[in-house]
């Protein structure tokens, strides 16, 4: 039986078996206690071995050590000790795999997150990383549930792609060309000889392909890995991260903001309801007050401001920013933090960014200076969602592509959507790893994904 289930049982006399990994062991003359964790919940389950009553278990008991895998069978009993209501009085014990104390790196003591990153294959056996993994899984489920309940179709967009969805050129290349002897034609790399017959790269976003399905099926979402070769070594950037991207036809920027807000509140409520034990842990150990904080976010309407208003607020700020503020600059993390933490005390949706700092596909406003972008900013992290109403006018979209130095031929199929039955449509992208960070309070994004990939690091 899984430990999570055992803790729901009345500690009435019954026989059961449990399997897990030893977290701690305490030996006295007559009794041996050890705690098992099987990953089903945060709490460990205590196994008690009465040495006098079960002398035949002595050989196995010597093999019990932190990290060992064990199967124990016995009788469930009320626990006299504090902290748990039941324990197992073992009458049979098998150590499936020993764990030598002199080499097992996860002895019972506090390890730094930096150290645990070096043993990322073992860190899920710690309280923190077990809790992160459970919350991450529950968040993924909540996301699917929200969209499935609201009529969105889940679309699988390609990971290998020939188009740059953000037009920012921060892409990893996929090739089977021999790197030591690259074929060339007229001085340029001959991609016709490459595996796909053209240059192929890892996707930065499923949005453009997502739009094609929204332009047929109405409401869709993608949820998959995305890749960015940007060399930003921060606590909120990964080179490989997961993104959730809904796309809605017949939807303008206001409905887009409403959806983003409703969606975030839905998944936060789901986690508070379903991950109580793990959230209590984060509340106590990682980010004190986070539960009340998330509750407040769920209850309070998100503040909505324009970029121009944001700039005015920032210019009046009594603090000096590292990056000076003027109309036209991209908001930096320090600005996003100031707005969410110092000014509005909660999430803020900023709209109407200057066209120069946003992607080619965003709908140009009548002022021709700003686009219908929307970024959802949150305290502690800054941008968690980036989205927009899309440019649905063919001529303007073509001009935007050219202005930004992109070739319209490369986007022929994307432009077709504006040629045939174009509609107002909108969508956004939620950084999945960032929402895990936001919900758990973990300070570094490298600690919310099992195997982080960042510049200079792809171990495991
Ligand atoms: O703002 P971004 O770049 O928007 C897009 O990719 C659009 N195609 C989304 C859309 O409209 N469908 O990225 C969206 C979100 C960001 O707000 C951030 O949360 C996350 O993805 N993100 C990253 N997360 C981790 N590491 C990185 N390097 C990230 N870059 C973006
Ligand atoms: Mg963005």
Image: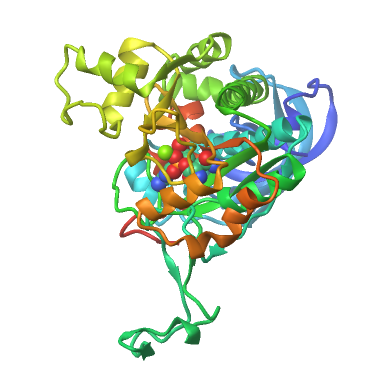
Q: Residue at x 66, y 39 (%)?
A: 423
Residue 455 in view (yes/no): yes
Percent x, y of residue 384: 46, 32
Q: Residue at x 45, y 35 (%)?
A: 364
In-image side of 349 versus 47 (left or right): left
In-image side of 420 versus 123 (left or right): right
Q: Residue at x 44, y 46 (%)?
A: 360
Q: Is residue 143 above or below residue 413?
A: above
- Pick out the residue farthest to the front: 395
Quarter of image, res 441: top left
Percent x, y of residue 145: 73, 33
Task: Quadrant for the C terminus, please.
Answer: bottom left
Percent x, y of residue 91: 76, 41
Q: Nearer the viewer, residue 386 or 405?
A: 405
Q: Nearer the viewer, residue 444 or 428?
A: 428
Q: Is residue 265 above or below residue 201?
A: above
Q: Is residue 453 above or below residue 438?
A: below
Q: Nearer the viewer, residue 370 or 271?
A: 370
């Amino acid at each position: 039986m899984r430990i999570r289930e055992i803790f729901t049982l009345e500690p009435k006399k019954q026989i059961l078996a449990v399997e897990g990994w030893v977290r701690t062991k305490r030996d006295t003359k007559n009794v041996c206690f050890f705690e098992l964790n099987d990953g089903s919940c945060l709490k460990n389950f205590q196994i008690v071995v009465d040495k006098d009553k079960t002398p035949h278990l002595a050989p196995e008991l010597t093999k019990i050590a932190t990290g060992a895998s064990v199967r124990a069978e016995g009788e469930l009993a009320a626990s006299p000790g504090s902290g748990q209501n039941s324990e197992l009085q073992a009458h049979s014990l098998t150590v499936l795999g020993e764990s030598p104390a002199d080499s097992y790196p996860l002895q019972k003591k506090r390890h730094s997150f930096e150290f645990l990153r070096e043993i990322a294959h073992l860190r899920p056996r710690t309280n923190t990383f077990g809790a992160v993994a459970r919350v991450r899984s529950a968040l993924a489920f909540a996301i699917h549930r929200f969209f499935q309940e609201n009529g969105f179709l889940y679309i699988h967009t390609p990971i290998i792609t020939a188009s740059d969805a953000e037009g920012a050129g921060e892409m990893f290349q996929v090739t089977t060309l021999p790197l030591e002897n690259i074929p060339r034609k007229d001085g340029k790399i001959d991609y016709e000889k490459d595996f796909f017959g053209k240059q192929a790269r890892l996707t930065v976003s499923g949005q453009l392909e997502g739009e094609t399905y929204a332009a047929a099926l109405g409401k869709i979402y993608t949820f998959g890995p995305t890749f960015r070769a940007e060399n930003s070594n921060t606590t909120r950037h990964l080179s490989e991260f997961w993104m959730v991207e809904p796309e809605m036809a017949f939807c303008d920027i206001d409905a887009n903001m409403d959806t983003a807000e409703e969606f975030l509140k839905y998944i936060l409520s789901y986690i508070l309801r379903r991950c109580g034990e793990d959230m209590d842990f984060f509340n106590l150990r990682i980010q004190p007050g986070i539960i009340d904080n998330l509750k407040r976010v769920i209850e309070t309407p998100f503040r909505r401001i324009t970029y121009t208003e944001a700039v005015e607020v920032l210019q009046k700020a009594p603090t000096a920013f590292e990056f000076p503020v003027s109309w036209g600059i991209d908001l930096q993390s320090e600005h996003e933090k100031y707005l969410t933490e110092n000014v509005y005390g909660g999430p803020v949706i900023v709209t109407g960014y200057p066209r120069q700092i946003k992607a080619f596909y965003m709908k140009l406003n009548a002022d021709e200076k700003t686009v219908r972008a929307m970024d959802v900013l949150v305290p502690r992290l800054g941008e968690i969602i980036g989205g927009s109403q899309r440019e649905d006018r063919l001529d303007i979209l073509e001009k935007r592509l050219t202005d930004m130095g992109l070739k319209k031929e490369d986007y022929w199929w994307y432009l077709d959507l504006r040629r045939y039955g174009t509609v107002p449509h909108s969508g956004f992208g939620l950084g999945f790893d960032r929402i895990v960070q936001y919900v758990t309070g973990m300070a570094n994004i490298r600690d919310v994904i099992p195997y982080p990939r960042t510049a200079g690091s792809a171990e495991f």
